[in-house]
Image (cartoon, rainbow, N blue to C red):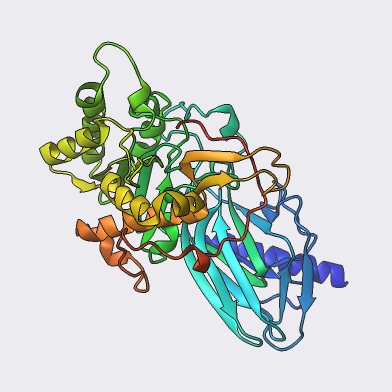
């Protein structure tokens, strides 16, 4: 009889979700809140139900009892764990209830490929927190055509190209009581086009500024849609149909942030160069975005970590940043001069401290890492966050309409005074890879 009642309750909850076009999950083994679907520690994802924990999750359910069905029980783990919901492509508001009647909670939430959504929520014993954020979910199909984005082999298993929204719960004591996922139609979508310095890096210890950006914006107002990929240049982004994919989703008032250069500068051949082919392709991106009613924003490439004997940054990007500045002026496009900002940032750190922002680690720092990592182009999470702060400040300095949706608690940022790494917190995500991303 109890089994039949449980099945009936699950059916009613799923029916309610279908009618309201929302998904509501009550985590734990206690009484299930009305209108919610129960999620226990053995609820693993499968295509039939369309929700559940990802394989490898080691979970503990705790029921404190009490009248509040939603907050009286929760699921936690001593290791990071992931929960997925099968949803159509689009933007979604996610609301998570965290807390414990009998103990503290310390939780960090990321989405898809390690996009930072909520950075360390702390609640005291008996206290609860409800946090919200907006996630862009995508697939590789290009709407209205029979074409797909030409994914690289390594992208096939990335969490941001599948048919589901995946949340990562991390940190010392992540106690999850409930999750609600609701489609949002009117959020401004900020599309990112770029390379490995922008992409949602899928694995530790690498990170890029695009995956840090979502945490700076008000939920329900802005969705960050990061279509950057490692190794891409302007022309390869076009030929792989990544730009076509972006344009197929863009609506009037959306943004397209464009940051390339590291890989473009390596191209050779007749007519190839910063003031010829590069400027031509930049103008193509701008024109195509404007045709869709979008707002293009040009971003100059950040410097590589390269210092001279006096501690000044050496330019290794040639005239490519200058070509971006010139194009922005000619086309009357907003410019975020990350090249200049990164110079100020790196020199504020200096040659030694700047190593703490890049993937520079001695052997055996991470499990299975037998060799030294020394990458002067790609950032670790701290470095990526500092670069993202430059981008957010650039949005403010340009007085973009987007600036009004920056979270009120986000302070202004001067690259000459970077955040203290000793106050920076990042719990490692479960996926690791010591192979350097494409591009340099």
- Give the quadrant of residue 359: top right
- Residue at image position (66%, 47%) is 431
| Left or right for 151, reference 10 | left
Q: Is residue 155 left or right of residue 272?
A: right
Q: How many marks?
A: 0
User: Is residue 332 shown to the viewer in this render?
Assistant: yes
| Residue at 66 percent of width and 57 percent of height | 83
Of the 4 image quadrants, the one containing the C terminus is top left
- On screen, residue 376 versus residue 7, left or right, reads left
The quadrant in which the N terminus is found is bottom right
Q: Position of residue 60 (x, y in %)?
A: 79, 68
Which one is nearer the viewer's eye here, 194 or 11? 194
Q: Can you name the residue that lies furthest to the top here?
A: 270
Q: Is residue 112 above or below residue 417?
A: above
- In this rendering, does residue 34 appear at all? no
Give percent across and percent down for residue 126. 65, 88
Along the line of sight, the residue nearer the viewer: 225 or 32: 225
Q: Position of residue 57 (x, y in %)?
A: 75, 56
Picture coordinates of residue 19, whole percent (x, y): 55, 62
Q: Is residue 270 above or below residue 287?
A: above
Residue at the spot x=56%, y=73% of the render?
Answer: 121
Q: Is residue 129 above or below residue 236?
A: below
Q: Nearer the viewer, residue 294 or 183?
A: 294
Residue 132 vs residue 259, the one in the foreground: 259
Q: Compared with residue 363, is residue 426 higher up or lower down, i.e. above or below?
A: below
Q: Is residue 142 left or right of residue 300?
A: right
């Amino acid at each position: 009889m109890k089994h039949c009642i449980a099945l009936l309750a699950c059916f009613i909850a799923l029916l309610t979700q279908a009618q309201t076009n929302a998904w509501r999950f009550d985590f734990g083994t206690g009484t299930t809140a009305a209108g919610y679907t129960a999620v226990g520690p053995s609820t693993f994802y499968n295509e039939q139900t369309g929700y559940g924990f990802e394989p490898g999750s080691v979970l503990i359910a705790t029921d404190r009892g009490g009248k509040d069905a939603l907050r009286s029980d929760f699921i936690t783990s001593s290791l990071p764990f992931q929960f997925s919901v099968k949803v159509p492509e689009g933007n979604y508001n996610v609301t998570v209830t965290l807390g414990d009647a009998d103990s503290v909670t310390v939780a960090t939430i990321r989405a898809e490929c390690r996009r930072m959504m909520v950075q360390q929520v702390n609640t005291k014993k008996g206290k609860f927190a409800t946090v919200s954020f907006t996630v862009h979910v995508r697939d590789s199909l290009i709407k209205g055509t029979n074409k797909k984005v030409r994914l690289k082999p390594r992208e096939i298993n990335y969490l941001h190209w599948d048919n589901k929204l995946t949340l990562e719960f991390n940190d010392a004591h992540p106690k999850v009581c409930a999750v609600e996922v609701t489609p949002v139609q009117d959020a401004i979508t900020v599309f990112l086009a770029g390379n490995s310095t922008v992409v949602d890096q899928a694995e530790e210890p690498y990170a890029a500024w695009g995956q840090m950006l979502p945490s700076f914006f008000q939920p329900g107002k802005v969705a960050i849609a990061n279509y950057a990929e490692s190794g891409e240049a302007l022309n390869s982004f076009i030929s792989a149909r990544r730009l076509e994919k972006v344009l197929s989703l863009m609506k009037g008032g959306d943004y397209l942030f464009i940051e390339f250069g590291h890989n473009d500068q390596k191209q050779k051949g007749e007519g190839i160069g910063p003031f010829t082919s590069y400027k031509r392709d930049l103008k193509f991106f701008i024109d195509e975005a404007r045709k869709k009613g979008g707002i293009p924003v040009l971003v100059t490439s950040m410097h590589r970590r390269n210092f001279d004997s006096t501690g000044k940054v050496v330019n290794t990007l040639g005239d490519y940043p200058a070509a971006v500045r010139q194009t922005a002026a000619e086309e009357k496009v907003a410019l975020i001069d990350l090249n200049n900002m990164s110079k100020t940032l790196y020199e504020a750190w200096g040659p030694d401290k700047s190593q703490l922002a890049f993937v520079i680690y001695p052997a055996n720092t991470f499990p299975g890492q037998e060799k030294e990592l020394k990458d002067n182009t790609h950032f670790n999470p701290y470095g990526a966050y500092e670069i993202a702060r430059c981008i957010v400040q650039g949005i403010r300095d340009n007085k973009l309409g987007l600036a009004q949706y920056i979270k009120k608690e986000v302070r202004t940022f001067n690259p000459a005074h970077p955040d203290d790494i000793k106050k920076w917190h990042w719990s490692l995500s479960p996926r690791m890879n010591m192979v350097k991303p494409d591009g340099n």
